[in-house]
Amino acid sequence: MSKSGEQLRRKTEEEEERAEEKASKLRGLPMESSPYLKYTDLEDYKRQGYGTEGHLEPKPDQGGGGTDAPTLAGTDLPEGQKPPL
C-alpha cells in the first residue's frame, strides 16, 4: 500500500473513532425530554421563564429607588440628643 493510501486509511479510522466517541457521550442523555432543550433561543427562554419580552432600555434621569427594607434597631438618636447642625 502506498504512503498516501495508508495515511487516508488512518485518517478515516481516526474520524470513525471520533464519531464513535461523540455518540457514546450522547448515549443515555434525554435528548427529547430534557427541560434544557425545550427552548429555541435565549429570548424564548426569558419569555417563558421570566415572563419578559426582552431587554428594556433604561429611562434617562431615573436613578435607583428606595427600598421597603426595615431600618436596623439602634440607628435612631438617643432621647434628648439633637442632630448636629
Image (spheres, rainbow, N blue to C red):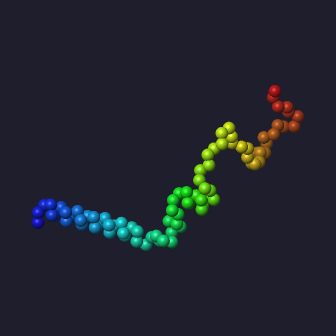
Front residue (pair 54, 63): 54
Residue at the farthest right position: 80
Residue 33 visible (yes or no): yes
Choose top left, top right, bottom left or bottom right for residue 24.
bottom left
Quadrant of the image occupied by residue 59? top right
State the image coordinates of residue 45 (x, y, percent, origin top left). Answer: 56, 60
**Residue 2 horizontal/vertical position (percent):** 11, 63
Judge from the rendering whether residue 11 lies leftward or rightward of residue 39; answer left or right. Answer: left
Along the line of sight, which residue is nearer the eye, 56 or 50?
56
Q: Residue at x 23, y 62 (%)?
A: 11
Q: Residue at x 84, y 37 (%)?
A: 78
Work out which residue is located at the far left of the displayed protein and give it: 1
The residue depicted at 81 percent of the width and 27 percent of the height is: 85
Q: Position of residue 4 (x, y in %)?
A: 15, 60
- From the image, which quarter does the N terminus lie in? bottom left
Left/right placement of residue 69 relative to residue 34 reads right
Q: In the displayed structure, would residue 54 be above or below residue 81?
A: below
Residue 39 versus residue 57 in the image, above or below: below
Residue 6: give x, y in percent of width and height. 16, 64
Q: Residue furthest top?
A: 85
The answer to whether 63 appears left or right of 26 in the picture is right
Q: Nearer the viewer, residue 82 or 2?
A: 2
Q: Residue at x 29, y 67 (%)?
A: 17
* In the displayed structure image, the side of residue 3 where residue 33 appears, left or right: right
Number of dots carrying numbers: 0
Q: Is residue 36 visible?
A: no
